[in-house]
Image (tube, rainbow, N blue to C red):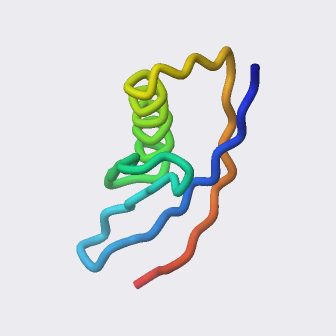
Amino acid sequence: MTKNFNVITERDVEGWYVASVPELQGCHAQAKSLDDLMERIREAIELCLESESLTLVEFRFNLQHIAAF
């Protein structure tokens, strides 16, 4: 089973990238680089799904930048 998730990213005033997944309450990550952020949000999605007892063989996410400072 495959599921797509929307990932919203922002860059805060201190230069950190912050990501959230609206479909998964409490699913957030932050990192200094976008590459690290993508790795961390993927891990966060896996943990959120695990905590909700959902098992997906594969998932994809769509990236959307909404703000820049």
User: The N terminus lies in which quarter of the figure?
Assistant: top right
Between 8 and 69, the one lying in front of the other is: 8
Taking the view exactly as shown, the residue that stands out farthest to the bottom is 69
Residue 2 in picture, x, y percent from top left: 75, 26
Position of residue 49 relative to residue 22, above or below, is above
**Whole-percent x and y of residue 62?**
69, 51
What percent of the width, then of the height, locates residue 17? Answer: 38, 61
Q: Give the residue at x 33% y 52%.
A: 30
Q: Which quadrant would residue 60 be assigned to in this image?
A: top right
Q: Residue placed at 54% from the left, 62% from the top? A: 8
Left or right: residue 18 compared with residue 61: left
Residue farthest to the right? 1
For the C terminus, give its image quadrant: bottom left
In the rendered view, tell whether residue 25 sits above or below residue 51.
below
Identify whether 28 is placed above or below 67.
above
Q: Name the residue at 40% across, 46% down.
A: 27
| Residue nearest the viewer, comparing 58 with 32 | 58
Q: Is residue 69 left or right of residue 60?
A: left
> Residue 64, how many percent across, how many down?
63, 64
